[in-house]
Amino acid sequence: MINVLVVDDHSIIRKGIKQLLLDTQDMRVTGEAENGIDALELVQRNHYQVVLLDISMPGENGIDVLKRIKEIRPQLPVMILSMYPEDQYALRSLRAGAAGYLNKQGALSQLVAATRQVAGGKKFISAELAAQLADNLAHGHLEQPHQTLSHREYQTLCLIASGKKLSEIAEAMSLSAKTVSVYRARLLEKMKLKTNAELIHYAITHNLVP
């Protein structure tokens, strides 16, 4: 039996996944958490074969929670679930240690097969992401400026581009405004940009705004 921990701040999503896996013969949801802190406690106390982790939750971001789960249980497969398009967060998730990345819009049709795949020790990516990666390799695409950012810097970029004020970004990321200012300065330097206006233009041009 594949024991699954579902981590999502929306109870309706957790219930939907639980019902979906209930209809299978070899999987069941044996743990639920609505935030990263609860998820880490459950991972420490219990044994799971797969974690299904939402990337966007209050407090700690899903990728930060992913990294901490891998510190506690390095061999535990973690599948990232997200409303964001794959070209925004999939590679970042995989680099951080995720066993797979699945857009929630395709979750119902692919979640069961994806969960079995990562439980068996394999990686899961969608056909669309695989095609994108193959295309990048075939054409020798260089890493774009926003892909060189750390996860926190990338979060800051996206939140600025979506119109959030510094104080709002600090609250959303559970950080001080001073720390967010440091991330902003770093990402502007790395991307060779000077102003928020240039940053917003870049984000819109590269479809980085949700």
Image (cartoon, helix red, strand yellow):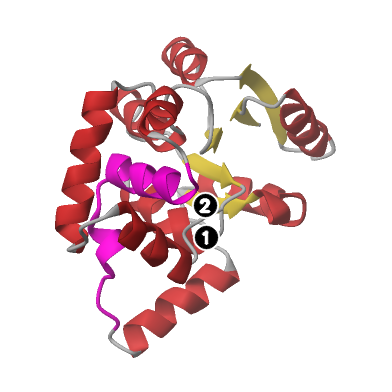
Q: Which mark is residue 101?
A: 2
Nearer to us of marks 1 and 2 is 1
* Image-based side of 23 in relation to 126, left or right: right
Taking the spot 45% from the left edge, 53% from the top edge, the residue there is 89
Q: Quadrant of residue 13?
A: top right
Residue 182, percent from left and from top: 18, 36
Q: Residue at x 50, y 48 (%)?
A: 162
Q: Main secondary structure of the magenta part?
A: helix
Q: Is residue 35 above or below residue 1?
A: above
Locate residue 8, reporting x and y percent. Answer: 62, 28
Q: Please state the horizontal and vertical placement of residue 19, each as a whole percent of the image.
A: 82, 32
Q: Which residue is mark 1?
A: 86
Judge whether 24 appears above or below 36 on screen: below
In the rendered structure, the answer to whether residue 12 lies left or right of residue 92 reads right
Asked if residue 68 is positioned above or below residue 186 in the image, the reply reads above
Q: Earlier in the sequence, mark 1 or mark 2?
A: 1
The boundaries of the magenta stretch are 141-163
Quadrant containing the N terminus in the rendered view: top right
Q: Decide whether residue 147 is among the magenta residues.
A: yes
What amino acid type should be assigned to the residue bearing mark 1? Glu
Quarter residue 50 falls in: top right
Q: Is residue 144 magenta?
A: yes
Against 204, residue 97 (above or below) is: above
Discs 1, 2 touching: Cβ within 8 Å: yes
